[in-house]
Amino acid sequence: MIQTLVATLMWALVASLLIFRRKRTDRSITYAALTIAIAMTLNVDEIYTAVDPLLGGTNLATLLADALLMTGLFFLGRGVMKSGEYRPALVRAAVSAPMLVISLSAIAVTFLFIDRGPTTTQFMSDLGAQPATAVYSIITFVYGGIVIAAMLTLAARRYRHSAGVQRLPAALLTLGSAFGVALCLAVIVMDIAHVTGRLGLLHAVQPTYGPLSLLTFLFLCAGFAAQPAVRRAQHYLRDKRTAALAAQLESLWNRATQVRPGLSQADPLAASTEDPEGHLHRVIVEIRDAMIDPRVTFDTSRTERALLERAESHLVGNDTAVATTLTVPNVEERES
């Protein structure tokens, strides 16, 4: 049941990313979501029992799913790292291609030494007592834990350096990463307990696997889905603020164009199709031109000048009325 829920969450994330991030040049997050979605789908019992026999019926589907999961985590970590300027050496090493290749090679070699038997949907429960199986699983989750810990470091830092609603995606990613690290540690403890025969410890930790797995993917998916939603909210509120400032300046603008009739070159139809920021920029420029033209008399009050300055600050991104509510993102995204 948990695997089905996780797979559903991942496919929902894939759909949202394809819709809202289709114009992005760096698609690391989308590749990650797609790869992990396939991996989680393979872990659904009905899918696994249908796919594994096609691969020989010796649980090769487990290796395929785990390799896809590790590859997806690689893309996920790369995407998070690329979203900001903070890229410490340890984080770069954790999400590097050599680290992925070494880890994939290690699980592939270790997998060969497992006495796998016929298809089973309880791979670790049935085979976890074998040292090779324990090593295989530990390598998989050590790699996952390292990458997710790197994501946790980046997400927590982004949260501290964000403000307003921009903190929401960072907070969700921080929580998801924290649960992910806890999940990896729990699995490693279970692997060690199983192979060493400490079944009491195994049974004590085992109930945490399902909730931790669900919480990890729930918060990570929510965090990545929230990023484009936050950007859309930022753009909407900025456009709304831009239109409001243009409306407040309209009477002053009308006076400016009256004293200098040749100033405004736009007809009403053109103005209606002009983008909000372009329109506000033209309004400001034409008011300023009237103010500095020595051939005309154009007086403005202190209130009008203050409004004009606020509009100028808004255009250059220094509008505190908006900035305190929504911080312009560091462009994740620059990417993703």
Image: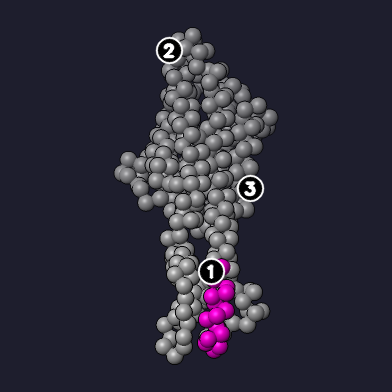
Q: Which residue is mark 3?
A: 15
Locate the N terminus and report the quarter of the image it occupies.
Answer: top right
Tell me residue 97's x, y (percent).
Answer: 40, 45
Give the camera-side residue of 101 and 44.
44
Numbered badge on residue 277: 1
Secondary structure of the residue carrying numbered label 1 = helix
Q: CA distance from mark 3 to mark 2?
A: 43 Å
Count of numbered circles in the view: 3
Tell me residue 327's x, y (percent).
Answer: 46, 52
Chain-order first, disc 2 or disc 1: 2
Secondary structure of the residue carrying numbered label 2 = loop
Seen in the image, is 117 located left or right of residue 83?
right
Mark 1 neighbour class, 10 Å CA radius: few under 14, some 14 to 19, many 20 or more: some
Q: On screen, 260 above or below 198?
A: below
Secondary structure of the residue carrying numbered label 3 = helix
Numbered badge on residue 196: 2
Tell me the amino acid under the disc marked 2.
Thr
Picture quadrant where residue 253 is located: bottom right
Q: On screen, 56 above or below 290?
A: above
> Which residue is located at x 61 percent, y 24 percent?
121
Magenta residues (range): 248-262
